[in-house]
Image (cartoon, helix red, strand yellow):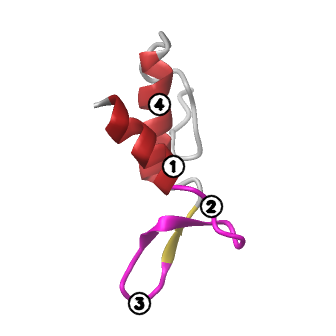
Amino acid sequence: MPDLLQRTLSQHTPDPHGYCRECREASGIAAAWPCATREVAEEAEYIQRGGLPGTLGGRHRTSRA
């Protein structure tokens, strides 16, 4: 599975306008970068390196009070 992780990280990159190159609908609408898929892949990479799940943070994470 490491190849899937690296492929996901290399495909979900920003375009010149700050949108994900991979997350596009047929209409051309794209997700803002970093997209949720990119953040999940970054978290998986972080865990693979020894980090604790849920501690990386990110734009889509909810804050806990």
Instruction: Report the amino acid beneath label 1.
Output: Ser
Disc number lying in front (2 or 3): 2
Query: Which callout, 2 or 4, points at the residue further toward the start of the chain?
Result: 2
Residue 4's place in the image compared with 33, above or below, is: above
Residue type, label 4 = Glu
The residue sitting at 50% across, 55% down in the picture is 12
What is the C-alpha distance between the residues marked 3 and 1? 23 Å
Residue 38 coordinates in the image, percent (x, y): 48, 47
Q: How many marks?
A: 4
Provide the residue designation for mark 3.
27
- Residue 10 numbered tag: 1
| Distance CA(mark 2)–CA(mark 3) | 18 Å
Q: What range of the chain is rendered magenta?
A: 12-29
Marks 4, 1: nearer the viewer: 1
Residue 57 x %, y %: 57, 31
Would residue 23 be counted in the magenta stretch?
yes
Q: Secondary structure at mark 2?
A: loop
Is residue 17 positioned above or below 59 on the image? below
* Marker disc for residue 14: 2
Name the front one of labels 2 and 4: 2
Badge 1 marks a residue whose secondary structure is helix
* For discs 2 and 1, the disc positioned in front in the rendered view: 1
Q: Which residue in the protein does label 4 denote? A: 43
